Image: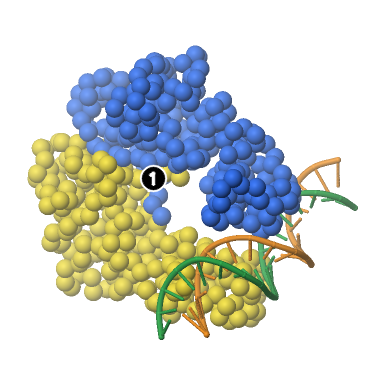
Chain colours: A yellow, B blue, C green, D orange
Amino acid sequence: MAIADAPDFRPLYRQVRDAMARRIADGVWPPGGLIPSEMALADEFGVSQGTVRKALDWLTAENVLDRRQGRGTFVAEVTPESSLFRFFRMADRDGRRKSPQAGRARIRRRAAKARERKRLELAAGEEVLELRRVRQIDGVPAIVERIVVPAVRFEGLETGQPPNALYALYQRVYGISIISAEEQLQAVAAPADVAEALGVADGAPVLFISRVARALDGAPVEWRRSHCDTSAAVYAVTLR
Amino acid sequence: MAIADAPDFRPLYRQVRDAMARRIADGVWPPGGLIPSEMALADEFGVSQGTVRKALDWLTAENVLDRRQGRGTFVAEVTPESSLFRFFRMADRDGRRKSPQAGRARIRRRAAKARERKRLELAAGEEVLELRRVRQIDGVPAIVERIVVPAVRFEGLETGQPPNALYALYQRVYGISIISAEEQLQAVAAPADVAEALGVADGAPVLFISRVARALDGAPVEWRRSHCDTSAAVYAVTLR
DNA sequence: TAGTGGTCTAGACCACTTC
DNA sequence: AAGTGGTCTAGACCACTAG
């Protein structure tokens, strides 16, 4: 941190944290990779080991790093399992988390609508990719999803079938780490197409979820609207 | 931490954290009160200032303490506003959080049912207090609630009308700080009594929330079941 | 001016993993 | 045995608040 073009009044541990976050976002430290030890980082940044530790602990709390005693510090890898555990909230009534299975998805490219431009902070005229699919829980269709992402960030997503766990793909192929998501939930009457896909009665109560997912830098990257049948699995969340 | 009946292999900062949490739970350090300085606590517990700081930072992250440079460390006061902001999740579609207004509540004391004993980890034969009420948002009935708490922890709650923000009362009168809550959400058809209380059609889709709230020591303290009309306000939550 | 928390340093020893 | 992170210590200086 010794070399700076302009004086930086942020705490050293904050500067170190941001410098390390940038290396991860830029792919200098790839997902799953081992990063240098505390001592090596302290030497490189010109600060004490304690200051590096504070930055490392911060990124660990943000689920960006993974520290293991005796082994080292790793860039947290977004696996299908881990991303589903963090952002897929369905569980049975005893709190045991469920995993979904994804059916075939249909993808198309089109101009962004006004509401999509607002949610994803896009300029006028920008394009989006829209993905529609049905996901199953325990073999039963349970979730109908419509996912919209900026086309420019996800070139090539149209070719081939996307996997069940999209966020692992986002990180592995596009270098985009999703670190938070804002969700809004409502109970609604199932529209005809949703009712048919889920195999429930027309107008049956379903859980509607609108989610905006954000990357490491805080930018909105995905808008997802889901209709969920909560008769078997429920939406589970812990407030702190 | 020098004096212990049995050897304690937990880290010192963990032991200090728990000792301080107990003082808050026992009312030795009342809500809003100033607690001793880092140096004074270090002397008292027989550990270094850095270890005390780690315990203080932990409780601060748990929203239990409030530290202000130059002034001191205070026990975070659960005000109606702060507790509603943390645990009441209704908002309008732009993400602006809403506050509820509570109508009259009916309270009764009875034996705990099997499911209640399980959720609240009660022994056989223990009693609970059951509170029923309707809450309004923007003047419109929006939430029907059934709240169950262990009678032994809340003696005297039956006398008088409980306030809208129960968790402030839990802390102020009973010394119980709620620090987390596990919620399960489902879309269901409104039962007849709920539909009538909310002024919606019989069988209309409503959001059903089952919440178990936990105190500083991790013990379950309240089981709350709510039916919400989400046609105007939505349930908003951020996943991290 | 005195006292507080916020930041930063430079060590030490321990527990765990790997070779 | 060597290297890692986890815990703990004992100082230092700074920024902020209050009398």
A65 lies left or right of A151: right
Residue at the (60%, 37%) spot, across then down: B24
* Image quadrant in which you'd find residue A95: top left
A114 lies left or right of B73: left
Viewer-proximal residue among B101 and B209: B209
Q: Disc 1 designates what residue?
A: A238
Residue at the (38%, 26%) spot, across then down: B148
Which residue ends up furthest to the top in the rendered image? B159
Residue A65 at x, y = what percent?
Answer: 44, 67
Residue B15 visible in image: yes
Viewer-proximal residue among A7 and B226: B226
Residue B67 visible in image: no
Report the amino acid beneath label 1. Thr
B43 lies left or right of A34: right
Above or below, B143 against A124 in this view is above
Above or below, A26 against A177 in this view is below
Label 1: few (<14), some (14–19) or many (≥20) C-alpha neighbours in 10 Å: some
Residue at the (57%, 65%) spot, across then down: A54
* Image quadrant in which you'd find residue B208: top left
